[in-house]
Every structure is written in structure tokens, then in C-alpha cells.
Amino acid sequence: MLRSLWHVLPRRRAATAAEPRLQEAPPPVQEGRSSVVTLDQDRKPRVRGSGAIELHGITKTIGLRPRETLVLNGLDAIFPRGRAIGVLGAPGAGKTTLIQLLTGNLRPDAGRVVHGMSVSWPMSARDIFRKEMSIRANVRLLSTLYGAWAPDMIDAVKEIGKIRRQDLDMPIGELAPDFMIRASTSLCYALDFDCYITDDMLCLGARPFRDTIKELMLARQKTHSFIIASKSAPAIRDLCDDFYILEDGVIKTFGDRRATFKAFTGVALTARLDPRGEARDDEF
């Protein structure tokens, strides 16, 4: 677990000459000034991260010979900072493999992944916590790894996940599976990554908790980036600025959000106003 987590640790050092230069890099933060999200003179929020997440010629096979399966085949994609991108794919299309590559838990057989932002683990992931440890102990461990203040993270997990104090100190393996999802998702949100990555697991758990997480994600979309992989376009349409389709081992787009949505679902979209006050789309 520790090796895989290292790939997604928030970057707290300045870029070196060996790192690739990414597009639209903002001016460096001056010494003595905070690097948290601030407002500029026009009162516009600053987008987190220094560049896009880029995938170049990614090829990945799963399984052992002679039963290897080619999942990704020369995939190229750019996930811009400050955007919420939905990756749509049928079951077995490779969405989970793509997410594991984005978070650093898998390495491509060929190609490279360039991170211009710190990325989260998959929100709602069930394997991020050790089941023999309590929620409190897991949160303390991960807070230390990510350089966060553990008491604040524990308070955030209790508040966002609606977890009672007596449940914090029980081995998480003895609690209902819903506790794992709520604790993992709440801590992931509280750690404040530049880019959040999630999948259909976001749709699990009690409805009040799902609604709370979606509201929090909408509130952060002006300053953070999101990559949401799902087999259900309607389930994530309110959270996404654009859609990609993962099919035949590559990423496909069809010009714009509406065309891509229709190509995947066969259902057209019409403009409407979303909860953030922006023009969005809706089904006929």
C-alpha cells in the first residue's frame, strides 16, 4: 500500500529541471506566501495544479500468458486542470485499469503518464484502509503520509461521513462495509488534492451521504479537477464539464459534451441551468 500511495502524494516541492514542462503553468509561489487557494484581484478562484494530466501511447495488458488481455492499446488523452471529465465505458472497457494508471497503482507496459497535479486515490476505495485497524488509526496513518494534521482529518471524517465517536475506535473490518466507503471518501475529500479521481463506487452508500459528497464536489469544481469513470452517463452528467468514451482500448471524443453523451447513450441533451448557476445540459 505504501508504494502505491507514494505516486499520488501531493507535490510540495518546486519543479526541477528534469521534470517536463506542462502547459499553462502559473507563476511560482513567492517565498513566505501561502500556496492554498486564494482569490485574485478579480475575485476569481485560482485553479489548483500546474498543468494537465497527460497520457501518451499507453498500452496495458492484464493477466498472465497465455491468457493476457490487451486492455489499453496506444491510448492518448489529456485531462485539463480545472475541468471535470467523465470517462464513459461499458463494463470491461478498462475504466478500472485506467484509474489505477492515473493514480500510480499500475505502470503501463508502454507509454508514459505525466502528472501536472497531485491526484487522489479513487474516492470510495475500499482497500485504502487496513481492516484490522480502527478508522481513527487509519486516518492518523494516512494523514502522516500526506503531511496533514491528523486531528483535523479525524474531525472532517466524523463530520462529512457522519461517523459516531464510538465507531471511530472499532476495527474497521468489524463495521458495516458502508463505513469503509464513508471514511475513505471523507478523508480523500479532506486531504484537498488538486485532482480527484473516482468511479461508480461514488454511487454506493446511503443516499444522504452520496448527496453530501456530490454537493461538496460541485463546490470544488471552480478550483479543482475531477476525473470520473462510469458506465452510466446520466449518473454523473451533473458533475462533468465534458465526456470521453473509453472503447477498444483508446479514448474517443466526438467534438463536444452533447455529441459525446449522445454517442454513448443514444440520448440527446438540451441546455438547462445546473445548481452552480451555469448553463448545462439535460435529457429530452
Image: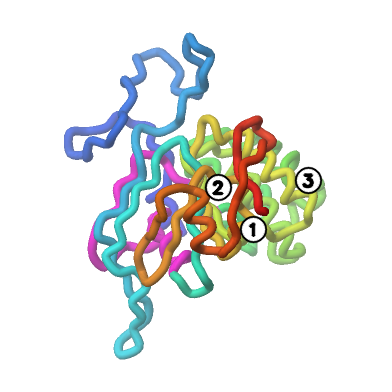
- Please give the residue where the numbered disc 3 appears in the rendered image: 162
Check disc 2 and give the amino acid type.
Answer: Leu
Q: Residue at x 55, y 41 (%)?
A: 143
Residue located farthest toward the bottom when viewing the structure as drawn: 66
Location of residue 215 with respect to 207 vertically, above or below: above
Q: Nearer the viewer, residue 117 or 245?
A: 245
- Please give the residue where the numbered disc 1 appears in the rendered image: 133
Between the C-alphas of marks 1 and 3, the distance is 19 Å
- Please give the residue where the numbered disc 2 appears in the rendered image: 141
Mark yes or no: residue 213 visible: yes
Q: Which mark is residue 63?
A: none
Q: Quadrant of the C terminus?
A: bottom right
Nearest to the eye among marks 2 and 3: give it: 3
Dot placed on the residue nearer the N-terminal end, 2 or 3: 2
Q: Nearer the viewer, residue 47 or 132?
A: 47
Label 2 sits on a secondary structure element that is helix
Label 1 Cα crowd, 10 Å radius (few <14 / some 14-19 / many 20+): some
